[in-house]
Image (tube, rainbow, N blue to C red):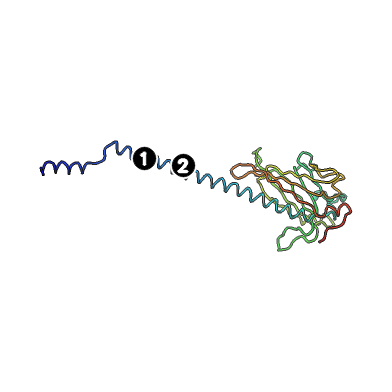
Amino acid sequence: MNPLDVNKRAKNNERGFTLIEITIAISILAVMFILNYRIIKGLIESKIEIDDKREAIFIANSVITRLTKELQLAVPKPKLAPPCDSPNSPSSTYSLLGEDGASSQSGKGTTLTFTAKEAGQFIPGGTTHSGAVQITYRLEPDPDQKGDKNAPLLLIREEIPNRRPYDLACKDVIRFPISNRVVNLEFKYYDKASGWENNWTGGRANNLPEIIQFSISLKSPRGAVATYTSAVKLTAAKTSRGGISPAQ
C-alpha cells in the first residue's frame, strides 16, 4: 500500500466536526430543550391549578359539613334571643331568622340565625356550651382588605348559649371567622305552603323551614371563583308546626 494513501486516510479519520454538523447538533438540542421545558412547565402549572382547586374544595367542604350538621340540630324552642348589642330587648318569637344581603336589617349582609341543640363549639378549658345554643352565620367585609373593592368577604360564625339573663349569656359569646375567601353566600328556604323563599322573616320565622339550600362562592388563592351548593332537611321542622317530634 502506498504510504501516502495511508497518511491521507489517517488525516481524514482525525478530521473534526464541520460547522454545519455543529449547527445541526445545537439545533436538535435546542428543540429537545424547548419541548422538555414545555412539558415540565405544563406539569407544574397543572399541579398548581389542581392544588388551587383542592384548597377551595377543602374550604367549601368544611363549611358545608359544618352547616349541614348544625342545621340538622336546629330546634324551634327556645326562641331566638335578642341581639347581644341590645340584650334587654323583648324576646323574639322567631325559631329561625334568615336575611339575604339585600334586605338584611343588620346591615351586615347575608345572615342566618337559629337555635341548635347540643351543637356548641369547644371553648377554652376543654368545655362546651351545653344545652341549646344560638348560632349565627353572616358575611362581613374583611378589615384587612379595606382598600380592595373586589376582596372576598369573611364568613363569621357566632355562638351564644341560649339562656337567661341574656346579658350574661352574651358574655360567653364565641365568635370566629370560618373563611376569608367567600365571594357570596345565599340561603333559600322551602316551605310546602309558600315554596322556595329567599328570606325567612316575619311570620314564617316563627317556624322552621322544611329544607334550607345554601350556595357558597369561594375565591381560590389564584383568584378562580367557584360555587358549591348543598341542601339540608330540618328534622325538627314538623315539631315547630305542631306535628309529631322525630325520634331521638
Name the mark nearer the viewer: 1 or 2: 1
* Residue 28 circle label: 1
Spot occupied by residue 179 in the image (x, y as percentages of width and height): 67, 49
Please name the amino acid that badge 1 sits on. Answer: Ile
**For the residue marked with disc 2, what is the amino acid?**
Arg
Compared with residue 23, is residue 71 higher up or lower down, i.e. above or below?
below
Please state, as top left, top right, bottom left or bottom right, where the N terminus lies in the image: top left
Left or right position of 25 against 72: left
**Secondary structure type for disc 1:** helix
- The image quadrant where one finds the C terminus is bottom right
Q: Residue farthest to the front?
A: 1
- For label 2, the residue is 38
Q: Quadrant of residue 25?
A: top left
Q: Residues within 10 Å of mark 2 (few under 14, many from 20)?
A: few
Q: Nearer the viewer, residue 65 or 90?
A: 65
Q: Residue furthest right?
A: 242
- Vertical order, 66 against 31 (above or below): below
Q: Are marks 1 and 2 in contact (CB under 8 Å)?
A: no
Residue shown at 41% from the left, 42% from the top:
33
- Residue 155 percent coordinates (x, y): 70, 47
| Disc sitting over residue 42 in the figure | none
Give the camera-side residue of 98 and 61: 61
Residue 34 appears left or right of 141? left
Q: Who comes first in sequence, dot 1 or dot 2?
A: 1
Compared across the picture, whether 19 is left or right of 122 comes to left
Nearest the eye: 183 or 245: 245
